[in-house]
Amino acid sequence: MLLTLLLSCNQYEFFNVTGFEQATFSNDADILFVLDNSASMSQEASALGQNFNVFINKLANQNGSGAGVEGLGDAVDDFVAYVTERGNFIDYQLAITTTTVDYTGAGASDALEPGEAGLLTGTPTVLGRDNPDIADAFKKNLLCDATYWDSAELFAPENQDPDYDCEAGGDPEIISLQYLDCLCGTNGWDNPSGSGQEEPLEAALMALCRAEENPPDACYEIDAGTPTVFTDADIGTNDGFLRDDSTVVIVILGDEGDTSRRIPNGSADITPYLDAFEQFERNIKVVSLGPNLVPDDDGIGYSLPCNNGGSTDWAAKRLLDISGQTKGFYRYLEEEIDGECALSDFAVHLDKLGDLLNNLDTSFQLATIPDITTIQVYVDGEVIDPAPILDETETGIPLEYGEGWSYESADNAVGFWGNPILNPKKLGEGCCIPDYQSDVRIYYRPLSGKPRELPFEFE
Amino acid sequence: MRTATFSFLVSLCWITTAEAQETIDVGALQNKDFKVVQKQLYDKENLREVAVHAGVMPFDAFSVTPKIDVTYANYMSETMAWELSIGGGYGLKNSNYKQLEGPAYGIEPDVYRYLTSVIGDIQWAPIYAKMAMNSQNIFHYDVYGIGGGGLTVEQSFLPDKDLSFAPTVTMGIGSRIFLANGSTLRVQLRDDFLLQSRAKTVDKQGLYLKQNITLSVGYTFDLRKMADDAKDTVQGSTDKEG
């Protein structure tokens, strides 16, 4: 009794430590495109296909990680490239599915077809960066298998390019009937329209379930007693897409927002999907290219000035919220330019996606809001100092940092600046971006006190 | 005069002896009327002893610390002594700590590991007793309390490895079992109260009270006896040579 009383005097403060989320430090990124394959989306799919090289060029240095090296010369070149261009070392995989989950009654048959209920589509379904023709292969999967083309529209005069030369290849100025015939084979692009109920979040979840060796409970049940379309027979049907410790980036492309089944219509509460994704115990980010959802002046409501897809504000807001909460980003498919709605610049969107992937290894999110003064950063046991601000706006917003780390309040993340660390014991030779294999630990005291519920009682 | 006095005393003894043969009522004897002290088999006054203690601090919520103490004690009387203790150890993360710092929680408590301490204390041993075991072996032991103070050095488990030099107040109880060769076994529970400054939380709290409770077993060497033995050995050699 006396001893208990005495021991209860010991007080300890608790620090959060970030660094176990090895997915964050992995250079593997599994990127899932979830496309709305309804009739209104062919223009956007075309824009994605036409601009996809921007994304590939941002990341697809074939000398990067995943490509083999032959001999010392190659290895040295590889290392130099690594030091100078880390983004090239993101080892990514690409796959596509559609927003169609309710496949019964949609499309050509009631049977499950590629692209439906999370099943990946294309041949091959998973494209790795070691594929020498990855850009063309992705375009083929996108335009030939995942996009619904309205025949009447495709045969219209403005979509004809009779001079397109299949042999010469190259990127066309427009996605014409002739180009599609060359790419997909004659009429190989003729796919059924997707379901009218766009469920990108449910489709993404199902796609991950199909790729996971041991799918979590969320794959099987929407809630107690309500089964999903997923059964044990579906395990491994997206085999090869998810790699150990990879970061998963879900890219949703749709003009109608999300009407997934786990959230009641009219609600923008995305908690069911955040919880479901959490069960995968992976770093999952959602990027959305969605409806033009603009906050009202009162800051409470939203309006949809360019809404050709007929989205509702709550459906669009689901994508906006889940993108923000998973530290991805949300951008508009269409924008009002000079009073008219026009397709936004997909090159910019894909460039941003490339930046997101490049930054996977230089920006580390914290679990809770930190007391900034208590942040301590270590790489392989060596302390890293805060980065000096080299340039800032008149209002004091930093524009450029020197070597070190900085806290980014917008992302609740610690970002690293400078050059890659070549040797943690000799930071003078290069600092302060950690290597993928580094032991990076970020300690901080949460503003809220205890970091989270402790597994035992302690006061 | 001397002869007269001696005669008087002899006659007095005779009278007293004669009277003792008769019953005399002296009333009920009470405890306060007695003071009986048996001579202690192992006396401590002027005893100087050096001890080595092996101990452990098992009660911290996040660490467990094996520890060695070396003490020197000087007995000013049978019950009072002063003692100097120099300790060294190394705190290890316990299962609570490991559970917290693992991927499931990602939490590290700002725990400081014990490294070393220097403590001076006064020892008071009011109880000396002997105890029979199985009606055969008899153990002589005492029970003592200690109180004192000193300095404890600890280091943060977190990678900044911040060092803390903490003023320390000590209390404790123990028992000394006397061995036939003059050595003793000491079993002791010592509670060190540290006033600890922790670099990463000085903004939140200036000083933290921390307790290091050590359970230890020590073996003492009687320097007084060792000196006597050495003297006897030298004396013996001298006698032989003589």
Image: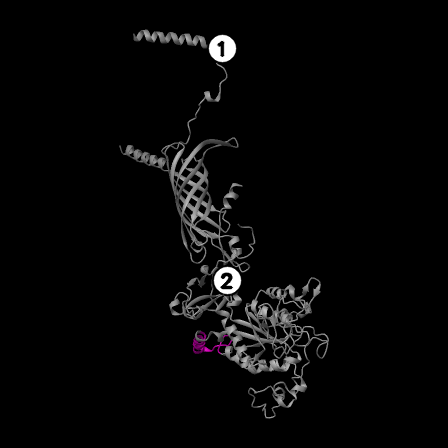
Which secondary structure class fits the magenta region best? Answer: helix
Q: Secondary structure at mark 2?
A: strand
| Left or right: B210 as drawn, with respect to A242 | left
In this rendering, the answer to whether B140 lies above or below A344 is above
**Residue wearing tag 1:** B23
Query: Please, what is the three-letter code of the amino acid marked with disc 2?
Result: Thr
Q: Chain of mark 2?
A: A
- Point out the residue furthest to the bottom here: A163
Label pair 1/2, CB-CB below 8 angstroms: no
Q: How many angstroms separate mark 1 from mark 2 (CA)?
A: 93 Å
Q: Chain of mark 1?
A: B
In this rendering, the answer to whether A103 lies above or below A214 is below
Q: Secondary structure at mark 1?
A: loop
Asked which quadrant contains residue A95, the reply is bottom right
Find residue A205 and report its horizontal and vertical position in percent. 63, 69
- Who is closer to the viewer here, A453 or B239? A453
**Which residue is located at x 60 percent, y 71 percent?**
A302
- The boundaries of the magenta stretch are A63-82
Find residue B96 and report its horizontal and vertical position in percent. 53, 53
Task: Decide: few, some or many residues near mark 1? Use Cα within 10 Å; few <14, some 14-19, many ≥20.
Answer: few
**Is residue A129 at least partly visible in the picture?**
no
**Which residue is located at x 47 percent, y 31 percent?**
B130
Q: How many marks?
A: 2
Give the colouring mode of the picture. Answer: one colour
Q: Which mark is residue A316?
A: none
Asked which quadrant contains residue A315, the reply is bottom right
Instruction: Indicate yes or no whether the magenta region holds residue B158.
Output: no
**Is residue A175 at least partly visible in the picture?**
yes
Instruction: Indicate yes or no whether the magenta region holds residue A68.
Output: yes
| Left or right: A102 as drawn, with respect to A321 | right
Find residue A435 and report its horizontal and vertical position in percent. 46, 69
Q: Which mark is residue A18?
A: 2
